[in-house]
Amino acid sequence: MRDNGVVNVGPEPPTFDDVIRVARHGAPVQLTDDAIAAIAAARQRVNELAESPVPAYGISTGFGALATRHIDPALRAQLQRSLVRSHAAGSGPEVETEVVRALMLLRLSTLATGHTGIRPTTAKTLAALISAGITPIVHEYGSLGCSGDLAPLAHVALTLMGEGVVRDASGTVLPAAEALKQARIEPVELAAKEGLALINGTDGMLGMLILAIDDLTRLVRTADVSAAMSVEALLGTDRVFAPELQALRPHPGQALSAANMTKVLRDSGIMASHRDPAACTRVQDAYSLRCAPQVAGAARDTIAHAATVAGRELASAIDNPAVLADGRVESNGNFHGAPLAYVLDFLAVVAADLASMSERRTDRFLDVARNHGLPAFLADDPGVDSGHMIAQYTQAAVVSELKRLAVPASVDSIPSSAMQEDHVSMGWSAARKLRRSVDGLTRVLAIEVLTAARALDLRAPLEPAPATAAVLQALRETVPAPGPDRFLAPEIDSAVRLVAEGGVVAAAESVTGPLD
C-alpha cells in the first residue's frame, strides 16, 4: 500500500519510521529548504577546489589505489561516468525493492547534510526517483561493506545517469532511460566529485539493519505470545514470571518479556485447573518454558543495542572526502561498515536462539512422555494420522539453517583495490544473511503458534486465557480446528502470514492492551 504522506528530508537525521514509510509503504520524499541550502554551500567549496591547481582527492584525482593521478578538467565528467559504470558491477539475485528504497533514502539523507559537495539538482533528481517509485535493480553480490556499499549504490547512481535497468512503480522491469522519460525526470550529467558522493556510503547495510529491527521488534513480542501459549497448553506454571523474581536479575528486556507473558496468560482456565499443588506434582518446568523471558529478554536488549547503533548511523554523514563546516574537504575512514556489521551479526545470533527455543517447545507437544496427556504428535488418530510430526521437522530444518546463518560475516575480510582497501567489514553480507534469518524465525514461530493452538483446542473443555483464545480465533479464520490429517503446508503458510503481518500480537493485544 502506497503511503501518500511526504517524508521531508533535511540536514537532521531521518527517523526509523521515515525509513519504514519510504522503504515498505512507498512514501514520496521532498528535500527541505535547509537541505538545499546546505547542499549548495558545500557544492561551492567543491567548485573552488575543482578549479584549484592543487590536487584534491575525489575532486581532481582518481580513486582508491589510483588516487595519485591528477585528472585534467576536460576529463572529469568522464571520470565520474567511468567511476559509476565500473562500480555498478553487482551480480546475482535481485535485491528486494524495500531494501533499495531504504538505501536510496539514506543516501539522500547524507546528501542533505551538506557534507558531500553534490549539486542540488543531483540530489533533487534522486528524490524524484524515490517519489516516482522507480527502483534501480541492485544485485545480491558486490559490496564488501567498506568504502561503503559501492556496487549497490553505483547501480542507483547509474539510474540517475539514465543508464542501467530499473523497476517502475508497477514493478515492471525496463531500461532506466525509458523509466525516467515516462516519469519526466531528466538524467543527470555528473560533475566533479558527484559520482563518489553517490556511492561512498553505508546506506545498504543501514537500511537492512533498520528493516530487521522493525521485523525483530514484532517477532520478539510474537515469541512472548507463542511461549505463553506453549506454557499454557503444556500445563506449565506462570509463577516463575512474577515481577519479584525478575527483579532479582534486572535486565530490562527480561522484565518486559515476563510481564508480557503474564498478561497473555491472565485468567487462563487451563492454568487454573492445575494450580492446586495436590493436582500438580511437578516442581518446575523445562528450560524452554521457564526461561523464555530470559532468552527473549536478552534478544530485546540486543535489538535495543542495535537500534542505538542504527540511530547513530542515521545521524552520520558518510562520504569520503567529506566537506566540513569550515569549508575544508578531508579524507576519512567513516565509510567502514564495522559498527553496522557487528550488530547485524549479533541479530542473526538472536534470531537463531529465539527460533531454537521455540522449536524445543514445539517438540514437547509431540512427545507423549512430555506433553501431559495430549495424543502423540497431536494426531487425531495416532498411527493412522501423523499430526504435526513433520511440521516440527520443518522447524528443525529452519533452525539448523539459522545456526549456520548465525556464523558472523564481520570476522572475515578480503583485501581489495591493490591492498589500498586491505580490511573490509563484510557488513552487506551480514545484512543479507540477517534477512534470511528474520524470515526463518518468522516461520519457526508460526509453527509453534500453529502447534500450541492445536494443543489448546485439545485441552477442551478447559478454557484458555482470553488473550490466547483471541490468537486461536485469529488463526482459525484461515486454519481449521483439529481433525484428521490435512494438507499441512497451506496451514503453515497461513500461520506464517499471521505472524509476519503482526496478527498474532494484534490478537493478543486486543485483550491485554499494548505489549512491550
Image (cartoon, grey):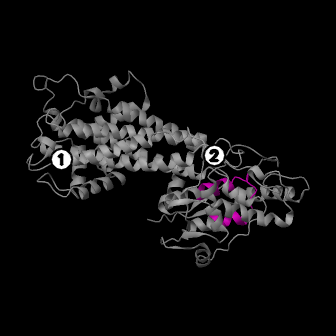
How far is mark 1 from mark 2, CA to CA?
47 Å
Name the amino acid type tagged 2: Ala
The residue indicated by pointer 1 is 454
The residue indicated by pointer 2 is 315
Question: Please, is residue 225 above or below residue 241 in the view?
Answer: below
User: In the rendered view, does 112 fall on the left or right side of 325?
Assistant: left
The secondary structure making up most of the magenta span is: helix
Q: Quadrant of the C terminus?
A: top left
Q: Position of residue 367 (x, y in %)?
A: 17, 37
User: In the rendered view, does 439 fall on the left or right side of 200?
Assistant: left
Q: Residue at x 52, y 39 (%)?
A: 343
Q: Residue at x 30, y 27 (%)?
A: 242
How many discs appear?
2
Q: Find out whether residue 323 is within the magenta segment.
A: no
| Quarter where residue 216 is shown | top left
Q: Is label 1 in a helix, a strand or a loop?
A: helix
Q: Position of residue 191 (x, y in %)?
A: 77, 64
Crowd class of label 2 (few under 14; some 14 to 19; many from 20; radius 10 Å): some
Q: Position of residue 409 (x, y in %)?
A: 52, 42
| Quarter where residue 378 is shown | top left
Q: Find out whether residue 116 is within the magenta segment.
A: yes
Front one among 416 and 170: 416
Front one among 28 and 393: 393
| Quarter where residue 292 is shown | top left
Confirm whether residue 209 shows in the render.
Answer: no
Q: Which residues are magenta?
A: 104-126
Question: Please, is residue 78 above or below residue 243 in the view?
Answer: below
